[in-house]
Amino acid sequence: MAPPLPPLMLTTGPVTAYPEVSEALSRPILYDGDDAFRGYYAKVLALLGRVMGLSTPPVILQGEAILGIEAAAAGLIGPQDVVLNLVSGVYGQGFGRYALRAGAEVIELAVPFDAAIDPADVARSLRARPDIGVVAVCHHDTPSGTLNPLAEIGAVVAAHGALLIVDAVSSFGGMEVFPEAVAADLFITSPAKCLGGTPGLSLLGVSDRAWAKMRANPQAPRGSFLSLLDWQDVIKDGRAFPVTPSIAEIYGLEAALARHLAEGERAVWDRHALTARATRAGILALGLALWPTREALCSPTTTAIRIPDGLSDKALRDHARDRSGVLLSLGRGATAGKVLRIGHMGPAAQPDHALRAVTALAAAASAQGLAVDRPAGESAVRAVIDGV
């Protein structure tokens, strides 16, 4: 039985895949032990390394991005480590559980989930505890729609000499951020967000320092689905893949990466940023409020809207989906019931979609009895798109 056709998906991931990706998924499945597939896999790895701006080979784990995040913690962190976990949202907070599982001492630097981490606070934390050896940060926490100043944080961590783990799942590809440019040692992202691919793979950039630390960590998984070490140089030495690769997903990844380069990185980033700016302008003109305390904290890949008192987030979501054909995302964890989120990722990052989102939200809010200025919202969107 075929799944139902979705409405316009302006969600925070997974996103509607680009047509090139959907077509690639239908290619004939190859045998992973054959040289033809191994050669193809090596080319996809090289393409991924190019897109990620890496000087070392990337790693592809065969599961959606939470696998990469958990594997990063399991491989890099040992019981002797002191970890500084930077918490500005649900996913940043969640990483602490993986670090604790490894037996590390975890220090949490937290801010309210409508704010962002201050690099000066990171520097103070590192000075207070010189023994901190690993720092973890979520670049863009989608349940909040906030963006942390990653380059500045990375510079502080590098000066301290600690290793940096970066969750860039919902930021990479939608804005200018590269692993080595932000001094990340383990950088995790996904094809199913801004690259317009499908869920099912974790994409990682791994520094030489991180590989050395994992090899020296007796607790780092080996012979495990969580193992990064098992995938190091898997093509070079001719050994068998640790597990059967998700072959169709690899096809889709290649198509997503090729499309990203064909459009041009800068053009992709600009498209995401314009869509987000237009959406936020429309939301504010409606008379609604953004969740982040300052618009400067907002990500170009997600707009989080504060639910007005007396309104239901689920009723707003359902009305937008059922009456306007636009699917939005609810909050998650600590932001559940407090926000409604509009995703601007991959194919959803189209300026015209900003108008669809604002119109749908205006209709949904009106249906709950909230007075909003729909013409003003739509005019604000058009003004941004037209460059007025």
Image (cartoon, helix red, strand yellow):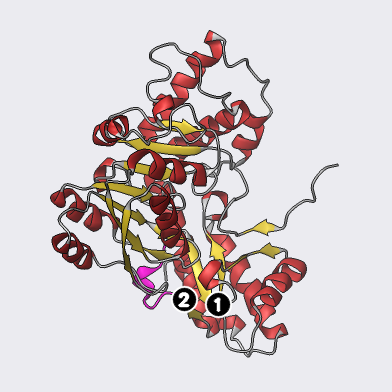
Residue 60 point in image, percent of width and height: 47, 32
Residue 382 in view here: no
Q: Which element is circle 1 on?
A: loop
Left or right: residue 124 versus residue 352 is: left
Left or right: residue 29 versus residue 381 is: right
Magenta part of the chain = 292-299
| Residue 89 position (above or below residue 101) | below
Left or right: residue 126 versus residue 361 is: left
- Quadrant where the C terminus sits is bottom left
| Residue 81 position (above or below residue 282) | above
Which numbered dot is residue 291? 2
Q: Which element is circle 2 on?
A: loop
- Quadrant where the N terminus sits is top right
In the picture, residue 23 is in which quadrant?
Answer: top right
Which numbered dot is residue 104? none
Report the residue marked by disc 1.
338
What residue is shown at x 55% (from left), y 15% (from top)? 37
In the picture, residue 316 is in which quadrant?
Answer: bottom right
